[in-house]
Image: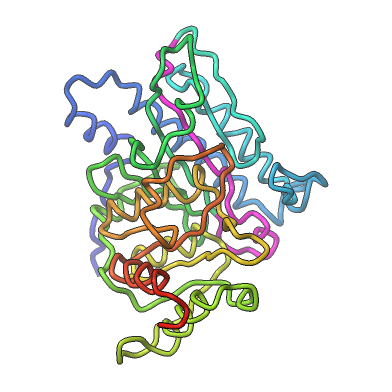
Amino acid sequence: MTRRPRNLQTVEAHIFEMQRLHPSASGDFTGLLNDISLAAKIVSQEVNKAGLAEDILGSTGGTNVQGEDVQKLDEFANHVFLKCLGTRGQVSIMGSEEMEHPFFADTREGSGRYVVVFDPLDGSSNIDVNVSVGTIFGVWRRRSALDHLQDEDLLQPGSALVAAGYVIYGSSTMMVYTAGHGVHGFTMDPGIGEFLLSHENITTPFSGTIYSVNEGHEPRWSPRVREVVRRLKYGRDGGGGLTARYIGSLVADFHRNLLKGGIYLYPPTDGKPDGKLRLMCEAAPLAMVAEAAGGYASDGSGPILEIVPEDLHMRVPLYIGSRGDVLWIEKMLAQPDDHL
């Protein structure tokens, strides 16, 4: 059987092609996305050695600003992204899920045009059992003068994002990003060490067949959320129920639902009334990807992309995926309990 030739467009070539849509572009943005792809390659190589190399798996013994155990690979990935994104001077501020405070980069020889917030290794507690993990990133433009940076330069809503994406480290490593011109996926070819275009112009179905939620939290949900999940499971509006698929790694659950159609839920609980997921480094970047692919992301009452963050680590409830399914949930949650 004759094999079809691979698509040999690398992520770097694709980003450069997108730059041509903006003749006045300086190249800073292209360089930034290339730096992100380099960091992802380095992290991917280390993740793939988990279980073989010494001192990769397990906890550092410390906790992050959210009080969560810091895994050794969390720390490694955070260091890699800080180093790779801070070398060309086009980034003025970096925020990370692993750091309490933002990092102000050296921009003496660069424009400092961009602000980047990332979760360096989402789902890292799953690495010990070989479950897919990922990186999430969002890119904003700096608003103030470079020598007078203010809170508003960092604390911007998702609607101001200029690019966002994620990397999933699974059976293959894949980078998915949007810069406002569609959602594109690139799969790592380990033989040549390059991300090659594999999923061009990803679109997600308007309604899906999958729901993803940690049903172990059901006793701590509100009556409205319980009814929403019950109808997703057993059927709504006379239709059949959806299929439950929950990995427990946000990037992996989101990626599957993006491609196949479905909805991911992380509702508030009585222990976490503001939700668990971070707005800036998780919810907002994935919301931009979802909407660019035809989906939608909500906090239960309105668009995630319209929320102005109060601080770097602000948490929000998240309902994200197929547009029709998320809009249905918003409608359900807006009803009084006695009308459910």
Residue appearing at x 61%, y 66% in the figure: 269
Spot occupied by residue 15 in the image (x, y as percentages of width and height): 29, 35
Please state the extent of the stretch shown in magenta in the rendering: 110-133
What is the quadrant of the C terminus in the image?
A: bottom left
In the picture, measured across the screen, residue 159 lies left or right of residue 90, that is: left
Residue 127 sits inside the magenta stretch: yes
The residue sitting at 73% across, 45% down in the picture is 72
Left or right: where 142 falls relative to 3: right
* Residue 299 x %, y %: 44, 58
Residue 281 place in picture, x, y as percent: 51, 44
Q: Is residue 119 magenta?
A: yes
The vertical placement of 172 against 311, above or below, is below
Quick one: 1 or 164, which is closer to the camera? 164
Q: Quadrant of the N terminus?
A: bottom left
Q: Is residue 46 left or right of residue 34?
A: right
Q: Nearer the viewer, residue 308 or 340?
A: 340
Which residue does the image show at 35% across and 79% down from the upper left? Answer: 209
The answer to which quarter of the image holds residue 110 is: top left
Say which of 130 and 290 sits in front: 290
Quadrant position of residue 79: top right
Horizontal relation, residue 151 to residue 192: left or right: right
- Residue at 49 percent across and 7 percent down: it is 108
The picture quadrant where one finds residue 217 is bottom right
Q: Is residue 306 above or below residue 241?
A: above
